[in-house]
Image (cartoon, grey):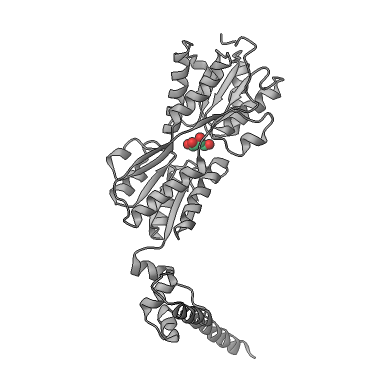
Amino acid sequence: MDSNNLVHFESIFVFCEVVIISCTIYDVARKAGVSIATVSRVLNNSELVSEKTKQKVKMAIEELNYTPNIIASALTKKSTLTIGLLIPDISNPFYSELSRGVEDACNDFGFNTVICNTDYCIQKETAYINLLRQKSVDGFVITTAHYNDENVINLAKDKVPLVLLDRNIDKSSGYDIDVVCSDNVTSGYLATNHLIQLGHKSIACFLGPPQIEVNIERARGYVKAIKEACLKIVPELVAYGDFKLDFGYKKTLELLNRGLRPTAFFAANDLIALGIIRALKSVGFSVPADISVVGCDNTILAELTDPQLTTINQPIREMGYYATELLIKKLKGERSKSEKIIFNTELVVRKSTSVCKKIGVIN
Ligand code: RIB
């Protein structure tokens, strides 16, 4: 076969391939001898269709190798049955557990999930939101990285259904925005009070980014416990950074190198706590014999480290599931008023904290 014929043959082949794949709901209805509406009911598992008719339609779908055209159904039903989830750090186990809850809820309610990692970058968040809006997602579940996130306000102004998960923004109460988070003030209080009850009076507090409400609230809980015990707040022992192991590690070494030696640390998440423990061990301290450490989140890491981490449990998966359920119920018209739901947290005592045996050095 010469090259011209080959090109001609390939173009016919490609054309035929396109014809086989692009059969429509109309072809299925015609082959099964039913209406379009009946095929649509079968595709949506309606109970209004007899078993006999269901089998006829399913056989036609199989023989024609029909796959529902998502864009076409979006144009007719104005729904792609898709939720966009934006998270700030996909490498943090907290977000894999949170995403698990969102995805489970989407599965249970017949929706798909598109997960986007924003890396705490507002430009990436903006680009993902624009992309998902072009793809006509039905709504958003957003764990924002910024307390004054204009993207969220713009979505609310455009009446795009959304829920803020784990983190709130400063203007949410003025818009139709659901918020699902945990009691972060109590988390900070429980962690710090646990250390105070063990006799610690010199307690450092390492937090994530200051532009996130979660950290402002956990710091508030830390201050509340310190003041309640009539202890002093030592500014040099309180630091904002990021929710990463490296921040906990480097900040601890910096503190020790300045001659500051608290007897305990409260870390605003488990990764920071692991960084603190690694730094303390690297310069010969024993945890908790010399210095106690408490984290926050209670991700899988808390059980895997040595010593196992005393931490604050957040109902992570439940928060993700419940937030998504709220959004889907709003999409289905089953609820309208926006709510702020705050989940309780609790102290989980493991092996990284013990009674204070030494006096801290804070001068
Ligand atoms: O580990 C990530 C932290 O940021 C968690 O504590 C969670 O609450 C999120 O806000």
Taking depth in this image into account, of 18 and 222 the one nearest to the observer is: 222
Which corner quadrant of the image does residue 138 belong to? bottom left
Residue 245 lies, in percent from the top left, at: 60, 33
Residue 22 visible in the current orientation: no
Query: In the rendered view, would you say 313 is above or below 163?
Result: above
Query: In the rendered view, would you say 263 is above or below 319?
Result: above
Residue 223 lies, in percent from the top left, at: 45, 19
Side of 33 where 248 appears, left or right: right
Side of 159 where 10 appears, left or right: right
Task: Tell me the quarter of the image containing the C terminus.
Answer: top right
Residue 54 visible in the current orientation: yes
Which corner quadrant of the image does residue 73 belong to? bottom left
**Image point (37%, 81%), residue name:** 35
Q: Report the label total.
A: 0
Q: Residue furthest right?
A: 284
Residue 18 lies, in percent from the top left, at: 50, 80
Taking depth in this image into account, of 318 and 48 the one nearest to the observer is: 48
Side of 340 where 247 appears, left or right: right
Residue 281 lies, in percent from the top left, at: 69, 24
Task: Tell me the quarter of the image containing the N terminus.
Answer: bottom right
